[in-house]
Amino acid sequence: MKKNLLLFSLISLLLISCGEQPIDKVIDRSLNVSMEQYMKMYDVMKENPGLLPRTLDTAGQLITARPNWWTSGFFPGSLWYLYEYSKDDRFKEAAAEMTSRIEKEKNNKGTHDLGFMLYCSFGNGFRLTAEKSYADIMLTGAGSLATRYRPKIGCIQSWNSRRGWQCPVIIDNMMNLEFLMWAFKESGDSTFYNICVNHSDTTIKNHFRPDFSSYHVVSYDTASGKVEIKQTHQGYSDESAWARGQAWGLYGYVVMYRETGFERYLNQAVSIADFLINHPNMPEDKIPYWDFNAPDIPEALRDASAGSIIASALIELSGYVSAEKGSEYLKVAETQIRTLSSDEYLAKTGENGNFILKHGVGHLPGNSEVDVPLTYGDYYYIEAMLRYRALPGK
């Protein structure tokens, strides 16, 4: 009996040392680290009224954001997720306080990012608390976002006219449709539904190449509604596959299939997923280079945020496809979670400016947020782990 126990212990230690600790243990450990980090971050942010954490500068100092910055909703949203996991009221109180800092953005008609800003924060808060004021705030915000819809084009305008772009639409915009679909279900106003479907269909038509990689920016002529140019802003080149852009597209079409049941959106999501996971430049550990066509691969920087978003999307997508296909997607997502939970990416408590993940890439061509923590990387990492824990039989 003692020999058997000793053998079992040695095997367990060997598995752990080889990175094969049971995934549920990996996730629980990583979520506990996330809780420790973000409670420390909350203590810092209490001393910075009206601001939200964004990233670190090259010297490792905290960079904060005003509520109108596109990433403002991710820290509050992560706190809501950690409250959902822990049932610890400290996180509920912290989440509510950080969420309240963004309320005025419900009237912001100058950005397409209200889904990120309001749905990740107030949306998670409403889901977990049923606080009516949160729903009211989001419905106002959804109305503000809807003003950016351009009927002649069939899309929500992302940025205002700039760089010769009359009506630029970026692939990231697919991520804000979940917010409008919630508003449709909450209000019964089919305007929100129609905007989402038209935007999704127009994006399939114009943003994607035959291999199902995506352009970053497609700009439209406002008079004719026709495409005027297809380019990039944050990727390596106009024709390259910027990793986070591909992740946004995947996640967005998974959501649109969930919300509409339209097979064309499932087919789009599956095609994007297969492009990503079968790409010859996808590393073995499944955390993508910042751009799949970066010229310095394999020395190119990885983007933990893209890996987090892809993992979360694949976990949900696995439930909409065949068992065989679902198993394939979950295997990739599990590898991504394991990699992100390793010492290479997961910060130690009290380090990394109290962010959770290291090695995110925001805008490399602009030399902005390069190889630093990013709040949205943290958010989708937490979301991916919670989604994995909620799988049947897990």
Image (cartoon, grey):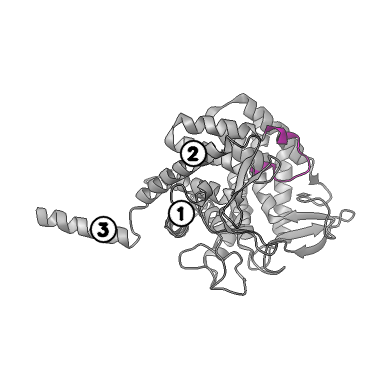
Q: Which residue is mark 2?
A: 39
Residue at 60 percent of width and 37 percent of height: 121
Identify the disc placed on residue 13.
3
Q: Estimate the spatial distance between the alpha carbons at disc 1 and disc 2, rounded to whole Å.
A: 16 Å
Inspect the magenta stretch and tell me whether residue 278 lies in it: no
**Pointer 3 or 2: first along the chain:** 3
10 Å neighbourhood of mark 2: few (<14), some, or many (≥20)? some
Q: Position of residue 120 (x, y in %)?
A: 60, 40
Q: Tell me the crowding category of disc 1: few under 14, some 14 to 19, or many 20 or more residues within 10 angstroms, Cα based.
A: many
Counting from the top left corner in percent of width and height, residue 338 is at 42, 57
Q: Is tag 1's residue or tag 3's residue first in the polypeptide sequence?
A: 3
The span picked out in magenta is 103-116
Residue 111: name its quadrant.
Answer: top right
Residue pictured at 33% horizontal, 53% vertical: 22
Question: Does the CB distance between marks 1 and 3 fall below 8 Å?
Answer: no
Q: In the rendered structure, which amino acid carries the disc numbered 2?
A: Met
Q: From mark 3 to mark 2, how far is it between C-alphas?
A: 31 Å
Q: Amino acid at mark 3?
A: Leu
Q: Secondary structure at mark 1?
A: loop
Q: Nearer the viewer, residue 304 or 145?
A: 304
Q: Nearer the viewer, mark 3 or mark 2?
A: 2
Look at the image and say whether residue 109 sits in the magenta stretch.
yes
Q: Nearer the viewer, residue 70 or 329?
A: 70
The mark found on residue 346 in the picture is: 1
Q: Is residue 171 above or below residue 150?
A: below
